[in-house]
Image (tube, rainbow, N blue to C red):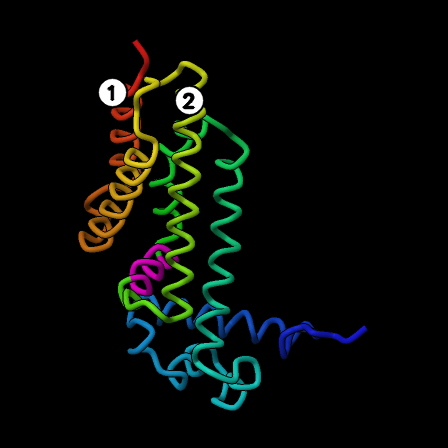
Amino acid sequence: MTDVSPPGTRQPRGRARRAAVLEAARRLFSSQGFKGASLAAIAQEAGLTDAGLLYHFPTKNDLLLAVIAEGDREQDETLAQVRDARGLPLLLRMAEFGADLEADPVLTALDVTLSAEHLQTGSEINAYFVRRYDNFRAMLAEALREAAQAGDLRPDLDPEVEAANMTAVLDGLRLQWLLSGGGVSMAQGMRVYVHGAIERLSAP
């Protein structure tokens, strides 16, 4: 069978260098943006030569996609607890999602920076963020629908509108948290919003 592992991932030293590049790229992409962070700066941050970085990631776009894939893996671990729940329990778990995001400020900043830089349609990164937002809203809408069917929430609620509103609040809190240096709390903001939405939408 042909080994299709990414370059530098078959030996412990290669894996460690690749991980160092990903961590350095995440930090610089989150603080300087994709366009602002050069491969040379990332290589220096990771303690590698330019050639050493290019061995693992031949292009800057390859590196960006790998950083996003690693971030996705970590966020999937965070969301695993949410996905195990359904209906009202899932919505209640969302009240703690702001605290989850505060626990990883670099990844949170990276998401905000990259999504803002790739608003133009047609790029692979733009398509990635479109899919992720679609999936996130669909997850919330399904939970709202299930909660209404179970009699926990009003049957006349609009799941798509409520899901979009909850996503917008989370996004707005995330941006304010970053711009305020943590002065605006995502954790508290999401708790207040989610519990308030559930109270507003509760069945009589």
Is the residue 50 above or below the residue 153 in the image? below
Residue 106 in percent (x, y) is at 36, 59
Within the magenta stretch, is there residue 114? yes
Q: Which residue is mark 2?
A: 147
Q: Is residue 161 left or right of residue 81?
A: left
Residue at 28% across, 65% down: 119
Amino acid type indicated by mark 1: Arg
Q: Residues within 10 Å of mark 2 (few under 14, many from 20)?
A: many
Name the residue at 38% across, 42% down. Answer: 137
Residue 91 horizontal/vertical position (percent): 39, 29
Quadrant containing the N terminus in the rendered view: bottom right
Which residue corresponds to mark 1? 200
Q: Earlier in the sequence, mark 2 or mark 1?
A: 2
Name the spot of residue 26 as percent of width and height, x first.
Answer: 41, 67
Q: Would residue 199 be found to the left or right of residue 144 on screen?
A: left
Magenta segment? 106-115
Residue type indicated by callout 2? Ala
- The secondary element bearing badge 2 is classed as helix
